[in-house]
Image (spheres, grey):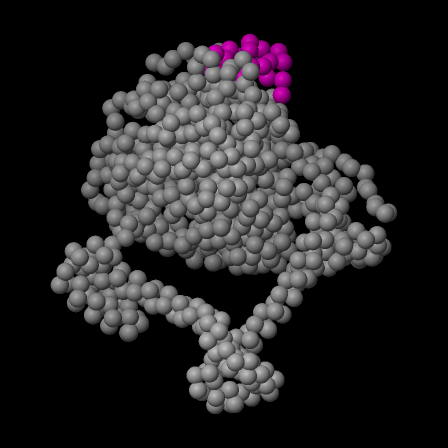
Amino acid sequence: MTSERDKLISELVLKALDGDLDSLNAVEDRVLRAKAKAALVKAKKDPKAYKAQFSAVESSTEKSGQKELTEAEKKISELVLKALDGDLDSLNAVEDRVLRSKAKAALMKAKKDPEAYKAQFLAVESSTEKLGQKKLTESEKKISELVLKALDGDLDSLNAVEDRVLRSKAKAALVKAKKDPSGYKAQFLTSANTDLNPIIEAKKTVAKIETLNSKIKKLSMISFPGIILNDDDELFLQVSPVNWYSFAGWLKSEPSLAFDSLQCQTGFDVGDEHLEARYNLHSMSHDHYTEIRIRVSRKEPCIPSVEKVWRIADWFERETYDMLGIDFSGHRDLRRILLPEDWEGWPLRKDYKVQETYHGIVIPKMKEGWE
Amino acid sequence: MGVVHGEEMVLNIGPQHPATHGVLRLQVKTDGEIVSQITPYLGYLHRCFEKHCENVTYEQVLPYTDRCDYLASMTMNFGYVVAMEELLEIKVNSRVEHIRVVMAELQRIASHLLGLGAFGLDIGAFTPFLHMLRDRERILDLFEMTCGARLLYNYMWIGGLSHDLPIGFVESTYKFLDYFEPKIDEFVDLLVHNKIFVERTADIGVMPQDVAISYGVTGPNLRASGLKWDLRRNDSYSIYNKFDFEIPVGEGGKGTVGDCWDRFYVRVLEMKESIKIVRQALASMPKEGDVHQSLPKKIKPPIKSIYRRTESPRGDLGYYIESDGSNIPYRLKMRSPAFTALSVIDEIAAGWLLSDVLAILGSLDIVLGEIDR
């Protein structure tokens, strides 16, 4: 029902875009009309994109039609393959006359070059076979779990299995496994059953980040030579601020890196001369992450904004600006975010002095040290 | 082309408004009833968390984390101690890990209960809110039994816990779970398939997956957009890899994937998964184990920095801690999940009716204490 409503809306909007607003205004359902108008407002910003999107809807319905066609084609190819292998009866047994005649026609063609035909359509079959195999491994996994439990003394869960075939298979596997329990365990024990040691895990991730960082450095040599300032053996990449915006875009779009998520951005007062912004990047598809540090001078703290690359950078950069006064050039709306607009100074700089009054309110002094 | 433009009006929602879940001001530009732009103004609850952290010792940071997300204090503690233990390279014993997981998952249920109840309240359903609070109260009773506090616990310490479990806690928790499990179905009957509720939430405020990722939206809000992403699985910490649980994702049950209804329903399903985890953790919890065993005498971490994320009820809770070798953090940054979730509001709520904006805001389940810190 809802998709019908969407379709109706898009139809109305398309009409309105072509100049026919009356049919939109004539809609009696108020909610529908409001939504359509809202959609129109958006669509007007980029009418071409909207039209392209709508035509995509239409073509998708066409596609589902195509899919049915391929269903019939698949059937035909199966029949033809059988006939080529000598089984003509199953083709003749088809009740659908259209399908039968099509299959016969395809057979005539196929006979001219049987090898090519087989090569073309056998791929379809093998994919269906693969599905079957996958199911098998599912049950195998279940069996290995049960056997592992039984080896550890918990036979009940094996006996509680209701599927008789699975149970007997698991028992047979258990008998085998008992001959060499440690070997079996080594084969099937996954990380899911072992305790995580944070220290070992941390070392593993450290190694992972190091190799990733050297990879990024190698890849960036081509289009961004010299942008990474530090050596490979550190856990972060020190990046020069000059080309940061285009480098960030590259980090996101390069397929083997695909850093599509900016996890965190931290502003940082390094010491006497410099301020730093640190970006924790993460890739959802590759599940790897790295840290990027950009150092600028305290006198002119200016870093190109990356809010167009990762939209969340918009607010993160506003927060960093708010707390440390780093100026992100190219940001569309760089204002304070947590503090009031007319607050003075940058609180997270180490040399920050609290203003004495704010709109006549006396600000209490922060205690020096703790007992 | 004869386009009709209504007079544009600027409307302030909040800072004092029950639907903003705290003190948040939304400046809304409206064209008739249709919203064209939303500008959130934050900071009304800013308590200088990060500045305070630079002036107190590592142990003293813990109570401040409580006060950031006051609806899920246990998980806020949990995230900080996990990060600190990784920085200090401490391994706590198995009993402590189990107790922490039980507490964190109970907290997740309590937080979702309030979130869902308040969401119902936002769009006019008053009764479910009372049901939710009644059940949440029982979880708070369990917490009170453990550490004496009902809201701000300061229960998990670096390297251990403040107290061991009291006598009778495990039995009471089992009793609560047995009571609560059927209550979820009752709740589903009451609100989830309610026609008025579905009309108000299905197909409203759809958040596509790529938008969610680009805006750094995480947790249930991201999963409702159809991405199976849960740090308890994908970047496992503590002992979550031991437990068997599902990660519910939005499937567009009443409309489009990633609409308000999906965000709502994912949380309902998550409560069921949390119950599963609590049961498993209680069953496998070792009877022996000193909860103060790995408590360090003096906390002086090595000179390095760490960024650690954990799964709070609202999403990725990250702590970036830089240590300079002293007993006071040089810099401590909290990456707040509600902060990123709120940033998406202009993107997904513009173009909808004014009444839908409140539904969308409620479905994001934000807590202002954590946004403003």
Q: In this view, does B148 lie above or below A132?
A: above
Give the quarter of the image for residue B254.
Answer: bottom right
Q: Residue furthest left?
A: A179
Which range of residues does the magenta coloring cover?
A: A341-361
Is residue A49 toward the left or the right of residue A116 in the image?
A: right
The verdict on residue A7 being magenta is no
Q: Nearer the viewer, residue B190 or A138?
A: A138
Is residue A284 toward the left or the right of residue B292 in the image?
A: right
Q: What residue do we see at 45% from left, 37% from top? A: A219
Q: Is residue B365 above or below residue A189?
A: above
Is residue A26 toward the left or the right of residue B231 in the image?
A: right
Q: In the image, residue A319 lies at what x, y percent?
A: 54, 26
Q: Please state, as top left, top right, bottom left or bottom right, where the N terminus of chain A lies in the image.
A: bottom right
Q: In the image, residue A301 lies at what x, y percent?
A: 54, 18
Q: How many marks?
A: 0
Q: In the image, residue B63 lies at what x, y percent?
A: 40, 28
Q: What residue do we see at 83% from left, 45% from top? A: B4
Give the quarter of the image for residue B164.
Answer: top left
Q: In this view, does A96 lie above or below B268?
A: below
